[in-house]
Image (cartoon, rainbow, N blue to C red):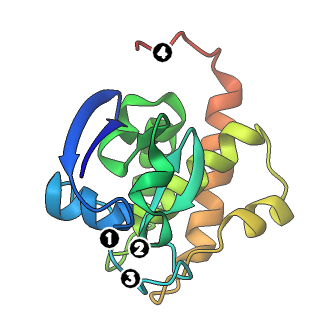
Amino acid sequence: MRTALTLNGHRHAVEADPATPLLWVLRDELQLTGTKYGCGAGFCGACTVHLDGVAVRSCVLPLQATRGRAITTIEALKQDRVGRALQAAWLAHQVPQCGYCQGGFLMAATDLLKRHRQPTPAQVDAALTNLCRCGSTPRMRAAIADAALRLNAQPARQEAP
């Protein structure tokens, strides 16, 4: 079945079963491999994307649930002010070790900072439900705090569509 998607600000048409998890459409049909497969059950968060700006697990999200909604993947995060600030903080704090889970964490952290300009440690912990086997979560917390400080120190600019 042919399905139209709004992905990273652009319209795409894909030929896939409506029950196919979005993760596989992104990776196999659209060649966007930044969204990773981890557990396939929605637990680990390596597959996190934004659906209408909210972090969701794409490995358990059927394609049919995305109709008429905006999907954002890690590939488009650099186009977003909050995403850019987080990516810079991630590098400054040397967060990634193996890097496999980092795209999902960045997507979750971007959602967090868009909802909470100055998140509390409890809000950070509640938002970071993804799994990291390397143990870089303390550096992620520091990077999120740093990005929040930088974002709050700069006036927001109008994003280009």
CA–CA distance in space, label 1 to label 4: 27 Å
Compare marks 3 and 4 and give the one earlier in the sequence: 3
Residue contact between numbered discs 3 and 2, judged by CB atoms under 8 Å: yes
Number of disc labels:
4
The disc placed on residue 36 is: 1
Eyeballing the image, is 131 above or below 126? below
The kind of secondary structure element at disc 4 is loop
Residue at image position (39%, 56%) is 63
The quarter holding residue 37 reads: bottom left
CA–CA distance in space, label 3 to label 2: 8 Å
Compare marks 1 and 4 and give the one earlier in the sequence: 1
Instruction: From the top left corner, tell me how far across and down residue 148 is, in percent.
Output: 67, 41
Compare marks 2 and 1 and give the one earlier in the sequence: 1
Residue contact between numbered discs 3 and 1, judged by CB atoms under 8 Å: yes
Between circles 3 and 2, the one closer to the viewer is 3
Residue contact between numbered discs 3 and 4, judged by CB atoms under 8 Å: no
Amino acid found under the numbered disc labelled 1: Lys
The residue pinned by badge 4 equals 159
The kind of secondary structure element at disc 1 is loop
